Amino acid sequence: MEVTSQPKAFAPRDFHSSLMGCCEDMSICCCGLFCLPCLGCSIAKDMNECCLCGLGMPIRSVYRTKYNIQGSMCNDFCASYFCMSCAACQMKRDIEISKTTGEF
């Protein structure tokens, strides 16, 4: 059997927006501020995960690893623990930007 295509590899990169860049997309910011569980479910749906998995360090680490985003599990924990809404908004913004660039 001959292999005709390779899995898509991603070059190492940073998140498309900063952790505190909430004002870059006000609709995501408002969702994260007023209905964080809804934003978590949206992130999980984008990643084909269970809705209950959409927030926190584990999903952030999985996303970061899958798309070769630089960082560490310690950074993922700190961002998710100390500012969960900012971390969720950053992930959702990154997903939306990655969809437009064809990375997602």
Image: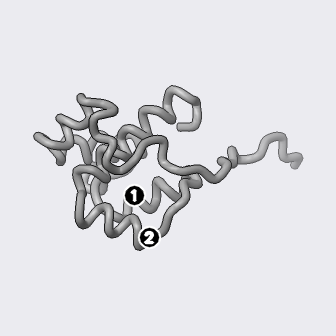
At label 2, which amino acid type do we have? Met
Residue 21: x and y, percent?
33, 42
Residue 67: x and y, percent?
56, 50
- Is residue 48 toward the left or the right of residue 1 in the image? left
Above or below, comparing residue 89 to residue 100 in the picture: below
Above or below, comparing residue 47 to residue 74 in the picture: above
At label 1, which amino acid type do we have? Arg
How many residues crowd mark 1 within 10 Å: few (<14), some (14–19), many (20+)?
many
Residue 47: x and y, percent?
42, 45
Query: Which residue: 40% across, 47% down?
Result: 18
Badge 2 element: helix
Above or below, comparing residue 63 to residue 38 in the picture: below
Q: Nearer the viewer, residue 39 or 74?
A: 74
Kindly report the distance in space between the C-alpha atoms of the residues bearing marks 2 and 1.
Answer: 9 Å
Badge 1 element: helix
| Residue under label 2 | 73
- First in sequence: mark 2 vs mark 1: 1
Query: Which residue: 58% across, 30% down?
Result: 102
Q: Nearer the viewer, residue 18 or 45?
A: 18
| Residue under label 1 | 60
Query: Which residue: 46% across, 53% down?
Result: 63
Residue 36: x and y, percent?
17, 46
Residue 39 placement: quadrant:
top left
State yes or no: discs 2 and 1 in contact (Cβ < 8 Å). Answer: no
- Farthest bottom residue in view: 74
Picture disc at residue 26: none
Residue 70 placement: quadrant:
bottom right
